[in-house]
Every structure is written in structure tokens, then in C-alpha cells.
Image (spheres, rainbow, N blue to C red):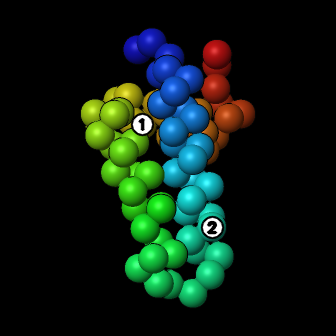
Amino acid sequence: MDRPSDELIELYRNVEAAKAEATSQPYTPEGWAPWLEAAQEFQRRAGGGAVEQAVKRIVLHPELDEK
């Protein structure tokens, strides 16, 4: 499989940043909305499956990224 696009990688980094922000505070629907919206957009663009997993591996485990 080819390396996922830099755009998808950056989009998932935004998901993780929004997740960190949302979970650093008590839950409110408004506080979690940016995370949920970012995650939905990532899933829509990645199309699931192998592409989504490859992006998550690159972002969450950069030490495994073989570039």
C-alpha cells in the first residue's frame, strides 16, 4: 500500500488534538463537538479500512513509520 497523503495524516493529527482538548475537561456536548466532527470528516475522507489504519499508525506510532 502507498503511503497515505499528507492531507489525511494532518487531518488525523487534528482529530487527536481535538480529542486531547475534549478529554482534558469535563464532558459537555459543545466541548466534544469539535472532536466528533473532526473524526467524522477523517473517516469520510479516509474511506475506512487499510487507509485509515495506515494513517493512525503513522500518527500514533511514528517510530514505526518507514517513510
| Residue at image coords 55%, 62% | 19
Which three-letter amino acid code belongs to the residue tagged 1?
Answer: Gln
**The N terminus lies in quadrant:** top left
Q: 31 or 16: nearer the eye?
A: 31
Examine the rendering and report whether any part of residue 62 can be seen.
yes
| Side of 48 relative to 38 (left or right) | left
Q: Label 2, label 1: how many angstroms apart (C-alpha)? A: 22 Å
| Residue at image coords 47%, 62% | 34
Whichever of labels 2 and 1 marks the residue nearer the N terminus, that label is 2
Residue 43, position as x, y percentages in the image: 33, 43
Residue 33, position as x, y percentages in the image: 43, 68
Residue 24, position as x, y percentages in the image: 65, 76
Which residue is under mark 2? 21
| Side of 5 relative to 63 (left or right) | left
Q: Is residue 47 above or below residue 15?
A: above
| Side of 54 relative to 10 (left or right) | left
- Residue sitting at the far front: 30
Which residue is under mark 1? 53
Q: Secondary structure at mark 1?
A: helix
